[in-house]
Image: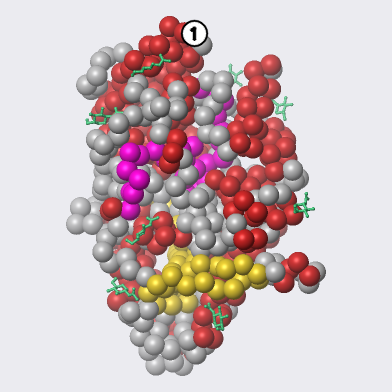
């Protein structure tokens, strides 16, 4: 009980101070994983993981004057902010040719632009214009003049909602089409993770603005009462188990050893001599670093080398397990952990030390997502079962909401998304009310626990890939891609082509 209070307090303190290091050991961790990724820290020695961006990614940066509040006529609603969007019109076939829009998620839009190779590769084929829209309150699209002002208090942060964000996308698209004098150009919306949720919701709410949505790894069912709150971490545990039972067990048992070592001077000294911590960081950070490495390597367990959040080898879960099962540094638990951390934090071999705090939020995700994850986007990713690869943590919904209330100063609205966008009885509801949505999910991705995994109708289809990870379909193709991945992309391409043909036929437009 005592410990729970300390854990909760440190969690709140961490939320307030944006700190990402647990103060009381391995079990006191923040669990506000954003769908995409909620790195406690993204630590790399490289300051520019963008080195892996293909030369194909070239765009023009534009700003649209966006309205602060779409749903209110009170004077403050008429305030505006510059909303950034990135455009590549090189392949556009003109007036009736398609516009492919990416629904920006919780971070700098360039990150998603650079990692959504699928759209870049489709553009020439469909003679499409590419438009990547940044989500309000992230990157450069921040109201009230600065990030600091935007998050000063609830009067300013309060305009950060999903409903506003989807309305931003709709108004921006309409304005863009008007400016292009292309009122009939069909728009297809794409998104991955939280962006995938927004893409699906945009098709449901604004079917007259977008003709279809590619919603990749979109956990639209990850809300209270819809999803099993333990399923997220069950999937992560199973990912590790599927590589090696020993690896899973070493990790599972390491938390107690870490906690024990952290509780006394001799133990801390032992950790300090095993792990090369950065200046300004301490061995207390190790549990969080390990937690992050486990969660994000499972999420981004891509079949090829990647540099999405940090440079990683192909199949990083397999590589972490290889490091644990055949350690180079020594056979004790900490040496094995050190080698496993090396896979996640030191793939390039350039990391001089562990826990570099200078790069803790390179993509500007934390302020916004901490707020969203505690107001509306209360996703079911908090419970950890006994026997998991991570330390057990009973799911406590009341406790979660209490913590959120204290951190944002607002009453959380955990049921609002289900009211605004639906989710319960989704198959019957969408079968009658919606069309043209692709839901892709990879079952190795913990977020598939909140995904749509079954076809809903002929035009609302679930592409489910047992070996797939977090929005892997949206990534640039590679010659090393496995066949299943090539087939997923081919299927998606065929479906998009079908939506476009259908649209041109309906509108009697010669394409
Ligand atoms: C659009 O992308 C293509 C290659 O992907 C590039 O050749 C072209 O210069 C880009 N256009 C703009 C306006 O950036
Ligand atoms: C369309 O043009 C108007 C007038 O120049 C401008 O205010 C608006 O931002 C433009 N729309 C977009 C999406 O850029
Ligand atoms: C995205 O790619 C562009 C062009 O290669 C690069 O300038 C930019 O730094 C990259 N940004 C991110 C966040 O990856
Ligand atoms: C937020 O800050 C502004 C500017 O300092 C102030 O006018 C407003 O009353 C504050 N709102 C709340 C809810 O504290
Ligand atoms: C940890 O180890 C480093 C050398 O790797 C040493 O410089 C530092 O003083 C040690 N810190 C503690 C608290 O023992
Ligand atoms: C990262 O890898 C390189 C090359 O193997 C090694 O020299 C270095 O010590 C590693 N960094 C850390 C923090 O372990
Ligand atoms: C794990 O097991 C203990 C003892 O049986 C129990 O008290 C605890 O609630 C369990 N934790 C979870 C997350 O199920
Ligand atoms: C859930 O958390 C609250 C704190 O908000 C606490 O009072 C309650 O005892 C916890 N419930 C369980 C079952 O641990």
Q: Quadrant of the C terminus?
A: bottom left
Q: What kind of secondary structure does the magenta stretch mostly adopt?
A: loop
Q: Position of residue 432 (x, y in %)?
A: 60, 69
Mark 1, other Cα within 10 Å: few <14 / some 14–19 / many ≥20: few
Report the image quarter containing ligand 8.
Answer: top right
Q: Residue at x 52, y 38 (%)?
A: 231
Question: Between 507 and 135, which is closer to the camera in this rendering?
Answer: 135
Q: Residue at x 55, y 34 (%)?
A: 19
Q: Which residues are magenta?
A: 26-50
- Whether 62 is drawn above or below 384: the answer is below
Q: Position of residue 415 (x, y in %)?
A: 70, 50
User: Farthest residue toward the right?
Assistant: 74
- Whether 388 is drawn above or below 309: the answer is above
Quadrant housing residue 258: top left
Kindly tell me whether mark 1's CB lies below 8 Å from ligand 5: no
Quadrant housing residue 380: top right
Check residue 37 for magenta coloring.
yes
Check residue 49 for magenta coloring.
yes
Question: Between 37 and 190, which is closer to the camera in this rendering?
Answer: 37
In the picture of the structure, the residue carrying the numbered disc 1 is 264
Q: Position of residue 66 (x, y in %)?
A: 61, 71
Question: Between 177 and 483, which is closer to the camera in this rendering?
Answer: 177
- Whether 420 is drawn above or below 95: the answer is above
Whether residue 137 is visible: yes
Quadrant housing residue 496: bottom left
- Whether 138 is drawn above or below 127: the answer is above
Q: Give the left or right position of residue 398, taking residue 19 as reference.
A: right
Q: Give the left or right position of residue 43, taking residue 352 as reference.
A: right
Whether residue 196 is visible: no
């Amino acid at each position: 009980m005592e410990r729970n209070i300390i854990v909760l307090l440190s969690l709140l303190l961490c939320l307030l101070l944006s700190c990402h290091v647990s103060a009381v050991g391995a079990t006191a961790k923040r669990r506000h994983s954003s769908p995409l990724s909620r790195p406690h820290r993204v630590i790399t020695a490289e300051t520019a993981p963008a080195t892996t961006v293909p030369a194909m990614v070239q765009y023009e940066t534009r700003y649209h004057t966006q309205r602060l509040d779409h749903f209110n006529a009170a004077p403050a609603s008429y305030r505006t902010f510059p909303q950034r969007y990135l455009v590549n019109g090189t392949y556009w076939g003109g007036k009736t040719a398609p516009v492919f829009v990416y629904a920006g998620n919780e971070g700098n839009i360039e990150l998603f632009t650079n990692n959504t190779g699928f759209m870049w590769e489709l553009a020439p084929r469909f003679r499409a214009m590419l438009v990547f829209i940044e989500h309000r309150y992230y990157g450069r699209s921040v109201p009230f003049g600065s990030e600091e002002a935007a998050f000063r208090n609830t009067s300013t942060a309060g305009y950060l909602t999903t409903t506003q964000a989807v309305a931003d996308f709709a108004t921006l698209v309409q304005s863009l089409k008007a400016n292009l004098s292309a009122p009939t150009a069909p728009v297809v919306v794409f998104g991955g993770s939280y962006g995938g949720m927004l893409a699906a919701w945009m098709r449901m709410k604004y079917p007259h603005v977008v003709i279809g949505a590619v919603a990749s790894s979109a956990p639209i069912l990850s809300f209270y009462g819809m999803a099993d709150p333990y399923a997220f971490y069950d999937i992560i545990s199973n990912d590790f188990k599927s590589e090696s039972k020993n690896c899973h067990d070493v990790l599972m048992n390491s938390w107690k050893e870490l906690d024990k070592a952290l509780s006394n001077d001799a133990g801390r000294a032992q950790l300090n001599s095993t792990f090369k911590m950065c200046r300004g960081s301490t061995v207390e950070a190790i549990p969080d670093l390990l937690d992050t490495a486990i969660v994000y390597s499972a999420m981004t367990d891509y079949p090829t080398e990647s540099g999405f959040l940090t440079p990683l080898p192909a199949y990083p879960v397999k590589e972490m397990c290889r490091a644990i099962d055949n350690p180079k540094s020594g056979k004790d638990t900490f040496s094995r952990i050190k080698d496993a951390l090396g896979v996640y934090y030191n793939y390039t071999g350039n990391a001089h030390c562990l826990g570099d705090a200078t790069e803790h939020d390179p993509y500007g995700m934390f302020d916004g997502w901490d707020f969203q994850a505690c107001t509306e986007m209360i996703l079911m990713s908090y419970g950890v079962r006994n026997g998991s690869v991570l330390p057990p943590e009973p799911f406590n919904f009341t406790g979660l909401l209490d913590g959120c209330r204290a951190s944002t100063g607002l009453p959380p609205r955990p049921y609002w998304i289900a009211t605004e966008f639906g989710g319960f009885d989704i198959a019957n509801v969408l079968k009658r009310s919606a069309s043209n949505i692709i839901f892709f999910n990879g079952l190795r991705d913990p977020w598939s626990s909140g995904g749509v995994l079954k076809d809903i109708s002929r035009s609302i289809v679930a592409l489910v890939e047992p070996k797939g990870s977090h929005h892997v379909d949206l990534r640039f193709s590679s010659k090393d891609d496995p066949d299943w991945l090539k087939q997923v992309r081919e299927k998606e391409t065929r479906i998009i082509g079908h939506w476009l043909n259908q649209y041109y036929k309906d509108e009697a437009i010669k394409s």
